[in-house]
């Protein structure tokens, strides 16, 4: 193939009249690239791009402006498959055809998954009696829980109209609200929420793919009710949940305060307990991943189980010499990891981590390499096929990026070590050299994982952790060698009453981690906040990461170029002048000093998200957020800093009439005349499109040009509740 490329390139250069020397250099470069590519293909590196391309197709599906017909998606996939079959006869077109097939396959995965999970929505504000079975319980505080209810009946809804599940918050006496309990009570429900900022995370989409068609609250604790046999999907969870509750109660009884709450979070996945102060310290210091059961915890449980079981089996020479105890240990580690997945609550991130770990442990049992980029690709492929929507979550992106960077990085180091050993013998080992290697390995692990996940943290959470390397270097040894090992032993011995000493040691380790998180968070302050980045910056960073990690030849270093461009683009996204919530009762306006002012009432969560996206360290309630804002009972006005003038928020008809004549921009949850001001955002706009971001530019003639981005598109996708009837015209389009 490379020789053919040389001939073709040479002929092309000769026809173009290129000098003989230039033709030779060009032909040599093409030949070198061809040989390098062939070596990559011989090592089956091309297959590693299959989940990447599938992921690209899934992202294409979610990014479409309208829902594609299932028949069209199926036809495209079939045509792409036929193109691959035809291209097999022409080697030059095979790779292009395979790329098209993978992207089409990803598009099909997204569409099929959407069709499978489709559930009816709550379309408007609703109050009525809910009857159903509790499927999941999330503790939010001592007297507050959030429960997912499998709906048996919903007042005023027919069976075909009611959602499969709803999620409600219950405050007060929450005893008895456990998985499997039948309940009945008065609830207030609303459609799944839209993103609180254009381009932000879509909470409604997450609920849709979990089969949840509405969310809200309960008017007081619901009554326990006998409503018939449990659905199988809940019945099998009941004994597991009772075990989780017993383990959590024992841990918190032995280890009081934040230490016990964190220990419980590490074992059962219950993160409702730790105080806001310690949670914030973990977040700012870059240690939040410790509180969320994912790859780190699964890997530690598997490593401790595998090493412990193998050491125990090695104590029996007949077994160690005649039986494959390594494979037995891998099987045992897989079983204990599965048990950990069950008692941890089976969170989506934990499920993904278990799949990745299971692939690696099965590889050990099949005499294959456990830690390889190929195994990561297999795990990613499994997750994307089963839950395509996972690719949109920060957890999926960060866990696979970190694992990919770690495995690829250590593979490259191992290759260099083999090259050195081919030249001369390895240096002798000493305790000092071993300690240095361990410290260097821990430092490199934190560095690789931190660099790989930094773009996602900046994009999704508008925060980087500049001292996370320090925090992880100090904290991970306690987590790895003290906390997780002691907690695993404590859980296994809990039934025999021997857990207390091990819990005490684990508690001491958690105290050290808490101290490290608090110390590093104090050093960090607000320095890690970054303004919203354009999506193209994340795309370029991810493309560069894949290019660096999935190839082995030297031209993989070309992946540094898109990463460098992404760094330059980070934080370059245009900053809106006005942000308006979907109810028309609250907004942020950029003032004369370039900082936001809050206008209206409520919306504390939205305020926090809006400020964070602007890299503004202020918190909701900060008095400076009201500087220059004037309010009366029927509305508010605020100065607009970018082009001068004022913005009005009208909550009553009298204010609307007055503001129309004096404000540049009028925002209202009422129906406003379109010629009221230079720009009007009224009830219809907000209901159809959700949160608005307004950008105001000064034109050459001294006028103003308005640009809008919105949280929802003009055409609703399946995970978005349908428009109320009054906002839909006779043809079914948005009015």
Image (cartoon, helix red, strand yellow):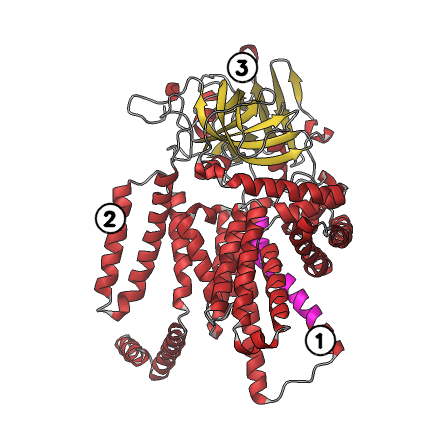
* Along the viewing direction, whichever of 259 and 541 lies nearer the viewer: 259
Q: Does the magenta run of residues contain 443?
A: yes
* Along the viewing direction, whichever of 26 and 475 lies nearer the viewer: 475
Horizontal side, residue 657 vs residue 108: left or right: right
Main SS category, magenta section: helix
- Quadrant where the N terminus lies? bottom left
Tell me the CA gap for discs 3 and 1: 74 Å
Q: Nearer the viewer, mark 2 or mark 1?
A: 1
Helix or strand or loop: what does disc 2 sit on? Answer: helix
How far across and down, in percent of the image, does residue 664 sit? Answer: 54, 24
Of mark 3 and mark 1, the one earlier in the sequence is 1
Q: Nearer the viewer, mark 2 or mark 3?
A: 2
Tell me the CA gap for discs 2 and 3: 52 Å
**Where is residue 422, by image quadrant?**
bottom right
Within 10 Å of disc 1 (Cα), the crowding (few <14, some 14-19, many 20+) is few
Residue at the (30%, 81%) spot, across then down? 3
Q: Is residue 19 above or below residue 720?
A: below
Of mark 2 and mark 3, the one earlier in the sequence is 2
Tell me the CA gap for discs 2 and 1: 59 Å
How far across and down, in percent of the image, does residue 125 sit? Answer: 48, 20
Residue linked to disc 3: 656
How far across and down, in percent of the image, does residue 623 sit? Answer: 73, 29
Residue linked to disc 2: 75
Helix or strand or loop: what does disc 1 sit on? Answer: helix
Q: Residue furthest bottom?
A: 424
Contact check, label 2 and label 1, Cβ < 8 Å: no
Res 24 seen here: yes
* Along the viewing direction, whichever of 132 and 456 lies nearer the viewer: 132
Q: Does the magenta run of residues contain 551?
A: no
- Quadrant where the C terminus lies? top left
Give the number of the disc on residue 434: 1
């Amino acid at each position: 193939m490379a020789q053919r490329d040389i001939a073709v390139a040479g002929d092309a250069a000769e026809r173009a009249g290129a000098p003989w020397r230039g033709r030779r250099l060009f032909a040599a470069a093409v030949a070198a690239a061809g040989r390098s590519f062939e070596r990559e293909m011989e090592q089956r590196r091309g297959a590693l791009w299959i989940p990447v391309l599938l992921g690209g197709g899934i992202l294409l599906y979610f990014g479409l402006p309208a829902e594609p017909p299932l028949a069209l998606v199926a036809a495209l996939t079939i045509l792409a498959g036929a193109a691959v079959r035809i291209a097999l006869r022409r080697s030059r077109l095979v790779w292009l055809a395979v790329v098209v097939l993978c992207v089409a396959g990803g598009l099909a995965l997204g569409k099929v998954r959407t069709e499978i999970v489709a559930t009816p929505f709550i379309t408007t504000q609703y109050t009525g009696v809910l009857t159903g079975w509790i499927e999941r319980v999330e503790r939010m505080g001592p007297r507050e829980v959030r429960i997912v209810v499998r709906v048996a009946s919903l007042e005023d809804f027919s069976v075909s109209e009611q959602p499969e599940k709803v999620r409600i918050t219950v405050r007060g006496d929450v005893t008895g609200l456990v998985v499997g309990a039948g309940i009945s009570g008065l609830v207030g429900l609303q459609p799944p929420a839209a993103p609180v900022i254009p381009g932000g995370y879509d909470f409604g989409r997450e609920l849709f793919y979990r089969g949840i068609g509405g969310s809200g609250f309960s008017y007081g604790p619901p009554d326990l009710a006998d409503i018939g046999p449990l659905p199988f999907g809940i019945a099998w969870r009941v004994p597991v949940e009772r075990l989780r509750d017993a383990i959590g109660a024992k841990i918190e009884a032995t280890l009081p305060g934040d230490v016990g709450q964190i220990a419980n979070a590490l074992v059962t996945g219950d993160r409702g307990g730790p105080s806001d102060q310690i949670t914030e310290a973990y977040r700012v210091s870059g240690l939040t991943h410790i509180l969320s059961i994912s790859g780190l915890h699964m890997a530690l449980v598997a490593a401790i189980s595998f090493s412990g079981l193998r050491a125990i089996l090695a104590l029996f020479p007949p077994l160690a010499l005649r039986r494959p105890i390594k494979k037995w240990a891998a099987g045992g580690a897989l079983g204990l990891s599965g048990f950990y997945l069950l008692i941890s609550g089976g969170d989506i991130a934990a499920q993904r981590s278990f799949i990745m770990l299971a692939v690696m442990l099965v590889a050990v049992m099949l005499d294959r390499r456990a830690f390889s980029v190929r195994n990561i690709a297999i795990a990613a492929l499994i997750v994307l096929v089963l839950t395509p929507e996972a690719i949109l979550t920060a957890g999926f992106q960060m866990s696979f990026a970190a694992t990919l960077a770690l495995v690829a990085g250590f593979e490259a180091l191992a290759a260099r070590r083999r090259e050195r050993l081919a030249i001369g013998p390895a240096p002798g080992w000493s305790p000092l050299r071993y300690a240095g290697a361990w410290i260097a390995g821990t430092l490199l692990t934190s560095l690789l994982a931190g660099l790989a996940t930094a773009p996602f943290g900046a994009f999704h959470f508008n925060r980087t952790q500049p001292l996370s390397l320090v925090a992880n270097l100090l904290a991970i040894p306690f987590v790895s060698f003290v906390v997780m090992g002691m907690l695993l032993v404590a859980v296994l011995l809990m039934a025999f009453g021997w857990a207390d000493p091990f819990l005490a040691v684990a508690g001491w380790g958690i105290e050290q981690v808490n101290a490290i998180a608090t110390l590093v968070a104090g050093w960090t302050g607000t320095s890690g906040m970054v303004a919203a980045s354009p999506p193209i910056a994340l795309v370029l960073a991810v493309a560069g990461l894949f290019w660096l990690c999935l190839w082995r030849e030297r031209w993989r270093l070309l992946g540094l170029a898109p990463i460098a461009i992404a760094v330059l683009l980070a934080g370059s996204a245009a900053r809106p002048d006005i942000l308006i919530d979907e109810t028309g009762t609250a907004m942020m306006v950029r003032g004369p000093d370039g900082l936001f002012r809050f206008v209206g009432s409520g919306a504390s969560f939205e305020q926090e998200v809006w400020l964070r996206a602007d890299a503004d360290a202020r918190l909701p309630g900060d008095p400076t957020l009201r500087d220059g804002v004037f309010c009366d009972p029927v509305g508010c006005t605020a100065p607009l800093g970018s082009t001068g003038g004022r913005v009005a928020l009208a909550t009553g008809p009298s204010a609307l009439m007055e503001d129309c004549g004096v404000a540049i921009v009028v925002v209202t949850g009422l129906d406003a005349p379109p010629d009221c001001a230079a720009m009007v955002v009224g009830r219809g706009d907000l209901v159809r499109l959700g949160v608005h971001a307004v950008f105001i530019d000064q034109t050459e003639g001294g006028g103003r040009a308005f640009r809008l981005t919105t949280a929802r598109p003009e055409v609703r996708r399946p995970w978005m509740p349908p428009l109320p009837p009054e906002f839909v015209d006779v043809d079914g389009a948005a009015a």
